[in-house]
Image (spheres, rainbow, N blue to C red):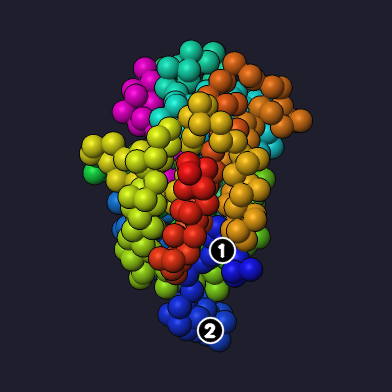
Amino acid sequence: MKPRIYYTKPSITDLEVNYASDAAKNGWGDQCYAYIERFENLFKEHLGVKYAVATSSCTGALHMGMSALGIGPGDEVILADTNWIATAAPIVHLGAKPVFVDILPDTWCIDPDKAEAAITPNTKAIVAVHLYGNLCDMDRLLAIGEKYGIPIIEDAAEAIGSIYYGKRAGSMGSFGAFSFHGTKTLTTGEGGIFVTNDSNLYDKVLTLSNHGRSRFQKKQFWADEVGFKYKMSNIQAAIGCAQMVRIGSLIQRKREIFAKYRENLAALPGVAMNPEPEGTINGAWMPTLVFSPDTDISREKLQSAFEEKNIDARVFFWPLSSLDMFVSEQQNVNAWSIPQRAINLPSYDDIKSDEIDRVCNVIYGFFS
Ligand SMILES: *Cc1c(COP(=O)(O)O)cnc(C)c1O
């Protein structure tokens, strides 16, 4: 049996190890936030936004951002049915209701018409999740937000490196959230970041992130409100700073791997891959194949074919409304149908060209 090909692995060099060691040795006392501040500054600069708060996860960043927008009991938040549960969990924790709408068949991201049709007087926000690095139709979503006075939140956890007509994913909404989980393009082990250009929202999140203690509060251990504790540690931030030095090449490598898959597979009949429309750049976090129904290629057939070759391929996200804790929304036909005939392909930084060939050969096997 050939060695297992994992679907994702972080790229950790001596630089990350040296930065983390330095933080472990010296990042205490008056240096205890030094890497965190540096990481926030590097990330702001990369993204082109004014404010950032590093967090322990993207989920935490979303939770605090949604709380700062005033989302609470009785409110509704619209998002695509196709998502990782992390986008929906904070909505539920705040006592609000996630409203799941269908995705577009080509980008697999939220359908703006469906989002607009789902707006009610209780709608407090729409979440744009840039799935697998594919970009949401931000022009339409921002116009809808403007028209109804509803903030558009960007969950850009999967979209580092994705650019929408010159603007980076995560920099366009009322706030953006990123994840630095070990499976993401840039990692700190676990971690995330909240970003915004809105100084009010930034102040609110900063206070929430510090257990409700305002930075202007001079009284020690005095909380002005009940907040959260979703901080990134200085040691994690040190790893993040090293990754930020390498961000260009981390993204470049993702795009190279995607280009190789596209070159090898996109010409097969009935196979769609992550789109990259004119004027946009796809950060290519997760190369994904969606087969047309007439190919008769199913998730289950794909999983067993990959398993047989010792390759770790990953299923396309289940519709959130198919999970037991939510009401099923089967009218979301794309969200319910696409995962049944789709797969994510391995794409870690140091994947070898012959490993990509092994992955492609499994797919060719369905067409021979
Ligand atoms: C990974 C991911 C998250 C959650 O990130 P954590 O850092 O694990 O909280 C949220 N949304 C999307 C779209 C993700 O892919």
Task: Return the disc, 1 or 2, that comes first in the chain's sequence.
Answer: 1
Q: Is residue 256 visible?
A: yes
Element type at mark 1: loop
Q: Residues within 10 Å of mark 1 (few under 14, many from 20)?
A: many
Question: In the rendered structure, does residue 134 fall within the stretch colored magenta?
Answer: yes
Please indicate whether residue 200 sits to the left or right of residue 318 in the image.
Answer: left
Label 2 C-beta lies within 8 Å of the nearest ligand 1 atom: no
Q: Which residues are magenta?
A: 131-147
Q: Residue furthest front?
A: 368
For this rendering, which residue is in front, 227 or 257? 257
Return the mark for residue 21: 2
Label 1 C-beta lies within 8 Å of the nearest ligand 1 atom: no
Position of residue 58 measured from the top left corner of the image (x, y, whole percent): 55, 50
Q: Which residue is mark 1?
A: 5
The dominant secondary structure in magenta is helix
Q: Residue placed at 30% from the left, 46% from the top?
A: 281
Q: Amino acid at mark 2?
A: Ser
Position of residue 26 measured from the top left corner of the image (x, y, whole percent): 52, 85
Q: Residue placed at 43% from the left, 17% from the top?
A: 113
Q: Residue placed at 45% from the left, 82% from the top?
A: 14
